[in-house]
Amino acid sequence: MDALKAFEGSVLVLGEVQELASPQILKVLKRAWDTYPGLRLVFTGSLTGVLKALRGAMIVSEQSGLYYIPDPVTRGAVQQLKA
């Protein structure tokens, strides 16, 4: 976990997260999310696949934000997802 401390204040983009079916990997990401508040995780892939993978392994509190940006270039919209 200390290896992620170097990324404090950074944005990590994880592509095709639905392929990360391993609960162990997602639990490490959840722990990093909770431990380093300056770390931002961006998950890409199909909305259905991302939500299925994340909801299966992560519990998102109401205070933390999980955001989905459908098309940031043309829409610029940010929708907050409720777990």
Image: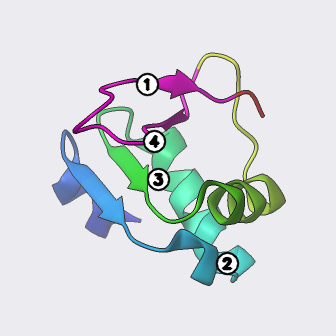
Q: In the drawing, does residue 49 fall left or right of residue 19?
A: right
Q: Residue 79: percent from the left, percent from the top? A: 53, 24
In 3D space, how far apart are the residues under numbered discs 3 and 2 (Cα atoms)?
12 Å
Per the image, the residue denoted by label 1 is 78
Helix or strand or loop: what does disc 1 sit on? loop
In contact (CB < 8 Å): disc 3 and disc 2: no
Label whose residue precedes the other's in the sequence (3 or 2): 2
Q: Nearer the viewer, residue 28 or 40?
A: 40
- Tell me the quarter of the image containing the C terminus: top right
Per the image, the residue denoted by label 4 is 70
In 3D space, how far apart are the residues under numbered discs 2 and 1 (Cα atoms)?
28 Å
Tag 2: amino acid: Gln
Q: Residue 39: percent from the left, percent from the top? A: 31, 43
Residue visible at 26% across and 35% down?
A: 74
In 3D space, how far apart are the residues under numbered discs 2 and 4 (Cα atoms)?
27 Å
Label whose residue precedes the other's in the sequence (2 or 4): 2
* Residue bounds of the magenta highlight: 64-81
Label whose residue precedes the other's in the sequence (3 or 4): 3
Per the image, the residue denoted by label 3 is 32
Residue furthest out toward the front: 74
Helix or strand or loop: what does disc 3 sit on? helix
Tag 1: amino acid: Val
Tag 4: amino acid: Pro
Residue visible at 29% across and 37% down?
A: 72
Q: Main secondary structure of the magenta part?
A: loop
Q: Assess whether residue 18 is covered by the magenta stretch.
A: no
Residue furthest out toward the right: 56
Helix or strand or loop: what does disc 2 sit on? helix
